Image (cartoon, helix red, strand yellow):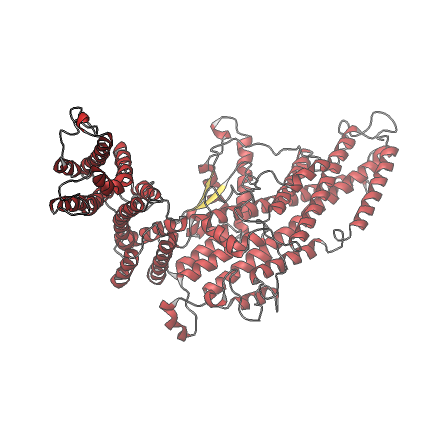
């Protein structure tokens, strides 16, 4: 009987257990209840072992190399540990080992049960594993590795060790496929890690691989594969490839930090080689120049022409009669883009072909600007905490409009999707400022022309009866005051952004790319000790980078320092461009959600006033012969004059509230302690911004709330110091006459003005 039990444990069938692991009814009366229980326990172990072996034979015939590796490793574990235990137990019985055979002739079933008890938990767990594997027809490597790693997290040592071996076997197969992608740029015909565009397939990567490593795998695989497919003159060096193979062989994805470090080292090495052999300095220069010209509006004549073309397009669609001619489509915007380039320096620019407008909401019919606005007393809730992230992409057309830039090989190694999203956000912001500024200029021109035409008949006065003469005079002065303050604010803000931020940072980046020290550029723009000078008078370094890494290359090109010009490695190039975008976002105030919310509201008020004046025929005063301009009764101001006075007065009050809030918030940003993102965190957000992140973040653009404070001595970041100095200059320009910094004077003048208005209204019969 003992021999029969050992055969059953080795995987053979027996009449002792006719169905599963229940003892045959004919043997049950001959056994003690304890012996019967031991036999059934041993039978259950044997049944699980037999089921696992049969499942492995079935699963090994599948087309998945990962499942086949798992089954082969599991069979080897059972052979080396379980089957060896069965053979050793049989040898002890035959040799009448005293530790097992009692009195040299009797083998207790309880002793056998104790020997194989250590396999109860492992075989039970492995049985559920093979059931789960058989329940799914096809297993991707990512979920399979995740499953094994999850099961290995147990307190039972033998179970944990078995699953660790299984997961390592599957990970080694995955590493082999990863080596083919990262070293040779090749993809397997079956179960590839990436598609033909080198985008990682869903489920191809285990969850223990970080987002940064996934992006790096895609980047390196596409780079090596594209160079190989293009049959480039210089291919990736074999000695470096062998070094990368050694690095990958020594690490597994489950060791996340070591794996991330190896992938980062491989990406750095590949980037350095690409920068020296594939992506030329000229490509980067042209891309930076093109993006600055069109996304940052450095090509001013083209920017103004584009705004006029879009306005002309909206007007033509508003006056169209048939349905197709009233819709604005992406092809219409592309045609407007080409028309805007005519007669400008962009006409012959080949990079213009990379620009395209995208309508996320699809084709639309244009709408006239809204004339409704929130009263000044209702602005406090909107100013305190913006309910949604502030965007500017709908101010140019009236619906979300995104400017895109098509990036091709090898430029896509330098420009990532997150970079282009930041450029698109900057374009939306700057184009909204420029468009509103243009509208206010047009409004100023219309008011001036209307006043000159009216003065031909009214002389030095504004005309009208004696009752409404003063009211018309006050209305005109109030209108001129509103348009003057709007024009002054937009002039100041746009001049600050384009001159102190965009121009300075662009020149700085160009100087770094050309090998000139950044400090020289800064001194040319801002004078001694200005934006470009370092803390110690030396050249500036990018925000968040040390001086040792800002201008000096990696060890692979250190020998070139003797030539006199520090060479630029790819890692430093990416860091400089990231810092460039970060400082553009921060310097233009887009990283401060409270300020962007106020700026957006100011632009909307300016648009509403310009639209209102346009509706009134280009003048805030009604013509003297218009119906309602003269009161029907004596001692009464005309209804149209009173109505316009109320509208202009409400806009004036709202504008003053918003300007005060803007100055107050801007002042706070230079004095309060920052309550989130540091330079490194902001840089990380710049690197990893995604389609869901850049506008989905509650801070507006995927960045934390940035303040511009004086940092502690010894820990000051020069980039933030420069941005803070720029913001302080903006504060000085806004407060050149002290009307913001001296609110008492302003409040007193406002009260006097309101008192005067009340007297005028009483005199005119309106109060």
- Dividing the picture into quadrants, the one containing residue 556 is bottom left
Q: Position of residue 535 (x, y in %)?
A: 58, 68
Q: Left or right of 239: which side holds 683?
A: right
Nearer to me, 390 or 410? 390
Side of 146 where 533 appears, left or right: right
Does residue 624 appear anywhere in the picture? no
The picture places residue 241, in percent across and down from the top left corner, at: 27, 59
Quadrant of the rendered image containing residue 41: top left
730 lies left or right of 283: right
> Which residue sits at x=49%, y=65%?
546
Residue drawn where x is 47% and y is 60% of the image: 576
285 and 423: which is toward the camera: 423
Can residue 385 be seen here? The reply is: yes
Vertically, is 245 above or below 111?
below
Q: Position of residue 127 (x, y in %)?
A: 26, 36
Please tell me which residue lies in front, 335 or 373: 373
Residue at 40% from the left image edge and 55% from the top image edge: 414
Between 713 and 605, the residue placed more toward the observer is 713
Taking 399 as reference, is 557 above or below it? below
Quadrant occupied by the C terminus: top right
State the residue lying farthest toward the front.
103
In the rendered image, residue 306, in percent from the top left (x then y), is placed at 52, 45
Query: In which quadrant is the N terminus drawn?
Result: top left
Q: How many marks?
A: 0
Q: Is residue 599 above or below residue 262?
A: above
């Amino acid at each position: 009987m003992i021999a029969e039990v050992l055969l059953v444990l080795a995987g053979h069938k027996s009449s002792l257990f006719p169905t599963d692991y229940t003892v045959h009814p004919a043997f049950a009366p001959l056994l003690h209840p304890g012996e019967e229980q031991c036999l059934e326990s041993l039978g259950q172990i044997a049944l699980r072992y037999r089921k696992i072996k049969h499942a492995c034979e079935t699963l090994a015939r599948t087309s998945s190399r990962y499942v086949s590796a798992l089954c082969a490793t599991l069979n080897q574990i059972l052979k080396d540990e379980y089957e060896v235990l069965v053979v050793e137990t049989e040898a002890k019985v035959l040799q009448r080992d005293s530790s097992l055979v009692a009195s040299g002739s009797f083998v207790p079933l309880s002793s056998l049960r104790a020997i194989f008890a250590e396999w109860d938990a492992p075989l039970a767990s492995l049985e559920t594993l093979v059931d789960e594997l058989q329940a799914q027809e096809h297993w991707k490597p990512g979920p399979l590795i995740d499953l094994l790693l999850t099961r290995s997290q147990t307190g039972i040592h033998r179970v944990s060790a078995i699953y660790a071996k299984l997961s390592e076997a599957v990970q080694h197969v995955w590493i082999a496929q990863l080596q083919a992608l990262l070293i040779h740029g090749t993809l397997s015909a079956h179960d590839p890690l990436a598609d033909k565009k080198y985008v990682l397939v869903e489920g191809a990567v285990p969850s223990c691989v970080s987002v940064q490593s996934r992006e790096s795998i895609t980047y390196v695989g596409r780079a090596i594969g594209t160079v190989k497919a293009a049959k480039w003159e210089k291919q990736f060096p074999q000695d470096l490839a062998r070094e990368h193979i050694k690095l990958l062989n020594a690490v597994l994805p489950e060791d996340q930090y070591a794996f991330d470090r190896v992938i980062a080292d491989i990406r750095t090495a590949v980037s350095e080689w690409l920068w020296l052999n594939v992506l030329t300095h000229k490509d980067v220069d042209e891309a930076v120049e093109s993006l600055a010209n069109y996304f940052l509006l450095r090509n001013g004549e083209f920017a103004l022409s584009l705004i006029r073309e879009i306005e002309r397009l909206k007007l033509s669609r508003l006056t169209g009669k048939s349905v197709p001619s009233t819709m604005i489509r992406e092809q219409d915007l592309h045609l407007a883009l080409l028309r805007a380039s005519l007669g400008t320096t962009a006409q012959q620019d080949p990079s213009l072909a990379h620009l395209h407008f995208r309508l996320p909401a699809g084709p639309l019919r244009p709408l006239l600007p809204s004339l409704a606005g929130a009263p000044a007393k209702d602005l406090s809730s909107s100013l305190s905490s913006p309910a949604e992230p502030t965007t500017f992409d709908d101010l140019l057309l009236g619906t979300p409009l995104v400017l895109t830039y098509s990036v091709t090989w090898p430029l896509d190694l330098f420009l990532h999707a997150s970079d282009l999203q930041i450029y698109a956000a900057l374009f939306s912001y700057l184009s909204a400022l420029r468009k509103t500024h243009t509208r206010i200029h047009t409004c100023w021109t219309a008011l001036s022309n209307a006043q000159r035409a009216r003065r031909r008949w009214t002389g030095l006065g504004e005309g009208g009866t004696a009752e409404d003469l003063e009211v018309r005079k006050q209305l005109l002065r109030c209108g001129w005051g509103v348009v003057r303050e709007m024009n002054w604010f937009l002039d100041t803000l746009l001049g600050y952004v384009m001159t102190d931020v965009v121009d300075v940072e662009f020149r700085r980046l160009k100087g770094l790319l050309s090998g000139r020290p950044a400090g020289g550029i800064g001194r040319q723009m801002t004078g001694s000790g200005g934006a470009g000078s370092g803390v110690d008078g030396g050249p500036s370094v990018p925000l968040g980078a040390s001086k040792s890494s800002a201008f000096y290359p990696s060890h692979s090109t250190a020998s070139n320092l003797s030539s006199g010009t520090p060479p630029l490695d790819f890692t430093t190039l990416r860091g400089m461009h990231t810092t460039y975008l970060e400082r553009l976002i921060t310097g233009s105030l887009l990283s401060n959600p409270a300020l962007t919310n106020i700026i957006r509201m100011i632009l909307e008020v300016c648009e509403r006033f310009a639209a209102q004046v346009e509706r009134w025929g280009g003048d805030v005063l009604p013509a003297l012969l218009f119906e309602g301009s003269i009161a029907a009764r004596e001692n009464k101001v005309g209804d149209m004059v009173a109505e316009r006075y109320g509208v202009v007065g409400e806009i004036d009050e709202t504008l003053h509230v918003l300007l005060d809030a803007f100055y107050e918030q801007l002042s706070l940003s230079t004095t309060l302690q920052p309550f989130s993102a540091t330079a490194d965190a902001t840089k990380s957000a710049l690197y990893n911004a995604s389609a869901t992140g850049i506008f989905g973040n509650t801070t507006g653009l995927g960045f934390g709330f940035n303040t511009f404070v004086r940092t502690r001595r010894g820990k000051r970041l020069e980039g933030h110091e420069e941005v803070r100095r720029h913001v302080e200059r903006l504060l000085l320009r806004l407060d050149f006459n002290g009307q913001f910094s001296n609110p008492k004077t302003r409040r007193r003048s406002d009260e006097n003005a309101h008192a005067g208005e009340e007297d005028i209204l009483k005199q005119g019969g309106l109060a």
